[in-house]
Amino acid sequence: MDHSQHQRFDVSQVSGSVLIGAEIYDLNDVSVGEISHVHGSGSNLQVVADVGTFLGMFGKSVIIPASSLTFMRDEDGNIHATTSWSKEEIEDMPSHEHS
């Protein structure tokens, strides 16, 4: 996906619930997962992403600081994010258990 023409926005401009379902792409533009929920707000916002899934199974949830993601909207208005981390780095993060 070519993100160069997508409109970037500051995550503080939207409520955390707007980010749920957003796809996350790694530094190689590979989809690594999607945001399932958020914790905190403002500069402390963290997203919980479901990563490493195969046919909806075998994955895990990880916490990613929102400050390490670049949020944007594509030409259809869909929100997604990119990061400078690789898919392997994200999948190697500790698991987050939903509470």
Image (cartoon, rainbow, N blue to C red):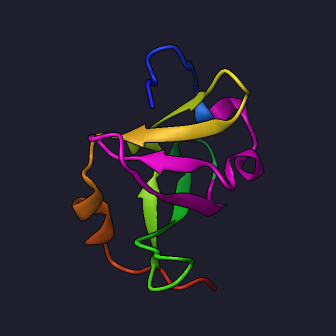
Residue sticking out furthest to the front: 55
Residue sticking out furthest to the top: 5
Would you identify the image quadrant in which residue 63 lies? bottom left
Q: Residue at x 63, y 86 (%)?
A: 99
Query: Would you place residue 40 above or below residue 60 in this image?
Result: above
Q: Position of residue 56 (x, y in %)?
A: 57, 78
| Residue sitting nearer the eye, 8 or 43 | 8
Would you identify the image quadrant in which residue 36 lies? bottom right
Q: Position of residue 47 (x, y in %)?
A: 54, 57
Magenta segment: 12-40
Report the side of 98 relative to 69 (left or right): right
- Does the magenta-highlighted stretch encompass residue 90? no
Report the side of 52 relative to 9 (left or right): left
Q: Position of residue 64 (x, y in %)?
A: 43, 58
Report the side of 9 relative to 28 (left or right): right
| Residue sitting nearer the eye, 10 or 52 | 52
Q: Where, quadrant-wise, is the N terminus in this rendering?
A: top left
| Residue sitting nearer the eye, 52 or 69 | 52
Q: Position of residue 23 (x, y in %)?
A: 55, 49
Query: Would you place residue 31 above or below residue 63 in this image?
Result: above
- Does the magenta-highlighted stretch encompass residue 24? yes
Q: Residue at x 52, y 84 (%)?
A: 57
Q: Residue at x 62, y 26 (%)?
A: 74
Number of numbered discs present? 0
Query: Would you place residue 57 above or below residue 62 in this image?
Result: below
